Amino acid sequence: MSGYDVLVLGEVLVEIHADTALNAATAGTPARISYSGDALNAAAAAAAAGARTALLTVVGDDELSVPLLRRATELGVDVTHVHRAPHPNGAYLLCADTDGEREFVYWRARSAGSTLAPRHIESWRPLLTRCRALITSGVTGALSPSSRDAVLAAAHLVHGAGGHLTYDPNFRPRLTDRPQARDLLARIAPLTGLLKTSCPADARALVDTDDPRTAATRLRALGARTVVVTAGAGRLLLDDGALQAFHTVPVNPAPVDATGAGDCFTGTATARLALGDTLADAVAYGTAAACLSVSGRGGTGHVPAFAQTAALAARTALPGRWEERPAGA
């Protein structure tokens, strides 16, 4: 069997979506169940972009594990390598409005996902050393000390085998503190082919700036080969080491929920890189897919087919750059 195009290492969550602001929720407030988490969101996007994709995670032994894995399979993601643990699945309650304002409440203590450990990575060694690309995140590394060790072990395996690593620091202060997140970032950045982050949120916490150009420069100084910085609606900075350039980001005329949009970018761009597209094209496809994804509710509410993504990317002005300057200038 040939290797996968994309592997995604991380956590899958049960998503409970409320139809009202969380501080207004009362008995009888309508809600629906779905499945999300940055790993599932990215894996679904990678599969939709045409990559042979597998999810590397640990799920629980509760009643929701079967529909959770069924949903991943429906999204085109291979779940045959998923491990089980005698713990509940993590979950979160989400409220989002059409402007993308979101509120979250998480239940992660002693979750199955947090039991991810180096022993799991060792069991996946043949997959990791033969894949074209791996996606993982700071969220995964912050779930537990063993999860952090697992992220580093997987990153080193893929990098050592000549594969591509995409990493999103995704700083979450409820999961970890800044020193720990910065330490993990410093250790993993030199292994990455693509490091995607947000500004100002992640950039301010991890590299002490709210300027996208400065953030990209500092992240590349840590060793990242290529950096993408999302900087609010309509702004995405790409720094490939030779040039820093803002790229055109299409606007969704009817947004519903921005949950998972960054993961959709990450999954799509990584998939297209793994399939041989140029960096500029992969980024264009990633931004188009992220734009389309906000038409759905929840992290996997709308995963665009690649034909839709490619059509939107083609309609967006390309190369779609402005304010170009040499990297580091």
Image (spheres, helix red, strand yellow):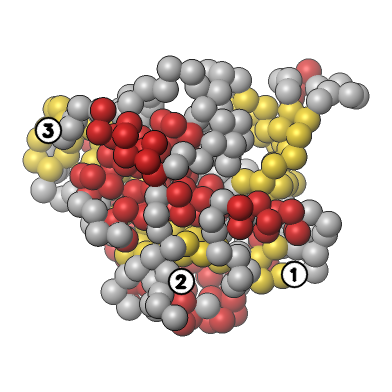
Q: Amino acid at mark 3?
A: Glu
Q: Amino acid at mark 2?
A: Ala
Horizontal side of 114 relative to 233 (left or right) equals: right
In the displayed orientation, state which residue is furthest to the front: 307
Which quadrant holds residue 328?
Answer: top left
Position in image of residue 34 (x %, y %): 69, 42
Q: Distance from label 1 to label 2 (Cα)? A: 20 Å
Q: Which mark is residue 85?
A: 1
Position in image of residue 38 (x %, y %): 54, 48
Tag 3 residue: 324
Q: Earlier in the sequence, mark 1 or mark 2?
A: 1
Disc 1 is placed on an element classified as loop
Tag 2 residue: 154
Q: State the quadrant of the C terminus.
A: top left
Disc 2 is placed on an element classified as helix
Q: Distance from label 2 to label 3 (Cα)? A: 35 Å
Q: Residue at x 35, y 54 (%)?
A: 270
Q: Residue at x 65, y 51 (%)?
A: 71
Horizontal side of 217 relative to 230 (left or right) equals: left
Position in image of residue 301 (x %, y %): 59, 37
In the displayed orientation, state which residue is furthest to the right: 27
Q: Which mark is residue 286?
A: none
| Vertical position of residue 136 compared to residue 80: above or below | above
Are circles 2 and 3 on residues that touch, CB within 8 Å? no
Q: Earlier in the sequence, mark 2 or mark 3?
A: 2
Position in image of residue 314 (x %, y %): 25, 33
Disc 3 is placed on an element classified as strand
